[in-house]
Image: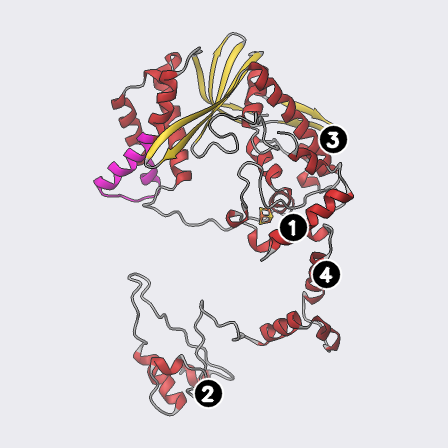
């Protein structure tokens, strides 16, 4: 019926591998019948792999399309134009989007940023720092690549949600669970702090967290898997507890996941040229005694860019590490005029989780806050001038972050080379550009 109904072309789809077992799959007898009828004789699977072996039939392996096999006429045209753009002048009617594509290609070839890559020359209202409450992580993302912030906040682009891999605890998920476990433990110990947590209490909280995690995913993993997940979580949290047991000059624990923001009793604000910005977020842990305070940010990963000793005395790392500065500002707002800060990284050495504290004393914390306010002013100036150009290599890691960016496809293949060339030209043209000045705020 399908064959007799088709007016110009009959497209038949057939999976080559079983989805469930990933084994090769036999072509269906129905498909082979239709192919044999169309070809006037029996057709074997290997015949389909040889172009032209069966007259009138074309076998198109979806997902493994050969470079030289265009899928339709539009693709034939696109390829011809890519090979020789001057052919566009000979087209009777220009296809949709061709002019935009030609504009973009010529903008990409120039040695300067353009509106196609973040040099907007005007300030989009949605990207203004005053447009919404600002969290430290939102600002860090903007410092790491202003173009990405423009795509997400200015244009509202977003990647589709990946379905969670139900039985796999990746580093990010483990970090989230560790934060939740530490919050639970803090509520159990009260002022005495995390240094007093016992091994059974840790195990029981870790078990509760992983069980809740799987329950929310509506999966019921076997007991050994729950045990394994619990052990992974215990190892990470235990590294934090080990640091707390060793800590000198302890202050009473005052709160975990302490919220601040416009709708909270605690609402720090900063005045900028474009107006007042509200800061929002939650402090992982706050220890406090009168005007002395310690704000702690747990980070489950390598201590970048600080390293184990922070020998280069980084504070905000080009605007990409702002959490402590923002938390210290919030603590000041609370009345703690002498805050200190600590990033408590939990790194992996082989299979072992080890704590790597990066601590700032009172003066260093003040330095971090001052640099944060300077960074905010530079980001504010960049937004007002419509400067949102891309940055492929963040300060904090010194390695490209584009492979894990949701908008990699927007920037396109080979964009790192193009972007770096344009950045150098921009640096010469406008040495005082606020986005470059931000990178100097260590
Ligand atoms: S792919 Fe790279 S340069 Fe492009 S928006 Fe993402 S992080 Fe920025």
Left or right: 287 as drawn, with respect to 332: left
Q: Left or right: where does residue 176 sit relative to residue 160?
A: left
The residue under label 4 is 106
Give me the C-alpha separation between circle 3 and circle 2: 67 Å
Q: CA distance from mark 1 to mark 3?
A: 29 Å
Q: Nearer the viewer, mark 2 or mark 4?
A: 4
Magenta part mainly helix, strand or loop?
Answer: helix
Residue 177 locus on image (x, y percent)? 38, 33
Near-viewer residue (395 or 157): 395
The C terminus: image quadrant? top right
Instruction: Point out residue 51 in the picture as x, y percentages from the top left corner.
Output: 45, 82
Q: Is residue 66 above or below residue 179?
A: below
Q: Which residue is mark 2?
A: 56
Image quarter where the N terminus lies is bottom left
Q: Residue furthest front?
A: 311
Residue positioned 43% across, 78% down in the render: 59
């Amino acid at each position: 019926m399908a064959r007799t109904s088709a007016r110009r072309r009959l497209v038949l789809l057939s999976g080559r591998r079983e989805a469930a077992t990933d084994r090769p799959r036999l072509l269906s007898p129905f498909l082979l019948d239709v192919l044999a009828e169309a070809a006037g004789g029996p057709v074997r699977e290997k015949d389909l792999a040889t172009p032209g072996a069966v007259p009138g039939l074309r076998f198109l392996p979806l997902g493994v399309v050969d470079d030289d096999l265009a899928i339709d006429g539009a693709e034939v045209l696109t390829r011809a134009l890519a090979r020789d753009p001057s052919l566009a002048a000979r087209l009777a009617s220009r296809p949709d989007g061709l002019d935009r594509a030609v504009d973009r290609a010529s903008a990409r070839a120039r040695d300067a940023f353009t509106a196609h890559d973040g040099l907007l020359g005007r300030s989009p209202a949605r990207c203004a720092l005053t447009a919404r409450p600002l969290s430290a992580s939102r600002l860090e993302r903007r410092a790491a690549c202003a173009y990405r912030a423009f795509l997400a906040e200015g244009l509202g682009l977003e990647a589709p949600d990946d379905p969670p891999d139900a039985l796999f605890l990746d580093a990010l998920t483990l970090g989230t669970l560790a934060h939740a476990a530490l919050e639970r433990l803090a509520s159990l110990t009260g002022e005495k702090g995390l240094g007093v947590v016992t091994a059974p209490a840790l195990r029981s909280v870790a078990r509760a967290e992983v069980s809740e995690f799987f329950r929310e995913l509506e999966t019921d993993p076997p007991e050994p898997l729950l045990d394994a997940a619990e052990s992974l979580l215990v190892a990470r949290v235990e590294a934090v507890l080990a640091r707390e047991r060793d800590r000198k000059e302890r202050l009473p624990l005052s709160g975990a996941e302490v919220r601040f923001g416009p709708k909270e009793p605690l609402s720090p604000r900063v005045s900028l040229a474009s107006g007042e910005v509200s800061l929002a977020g939650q402090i992982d842990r706050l220890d406090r005694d009168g005007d002395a305070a310690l704000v702690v940010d747990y980070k489950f990963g390598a201590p970048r860019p600080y390293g184990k000793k922070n020998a280069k005395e980084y504070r905000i790392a080009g605007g990409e590490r702002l959490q402590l500065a923002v938390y210290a500002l919030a603590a000041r707002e609370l009345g703690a005029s002498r805050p200190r800060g600590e990033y408590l990284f939990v790194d992996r050495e082989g299979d072992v989780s080890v704590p790597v504290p990066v601590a700032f004393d009172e003066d260093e914390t003040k330095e971090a806050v001052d640099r944060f306010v300077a960074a905010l002013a530079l980001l504010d100036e960049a937004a007002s001038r419509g400067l949102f150009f891309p940055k492929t290599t963040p300060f904090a890691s010194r390695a490209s972050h584009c492979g894990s960016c949701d908008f990699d496809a927007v920037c396109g293949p080979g964009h790192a080379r193009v972007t770096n060339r344009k950045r150098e030209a921009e640096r010469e043209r406008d040495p005082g550009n606020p986005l470059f000045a931000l990178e100097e705020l260590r």
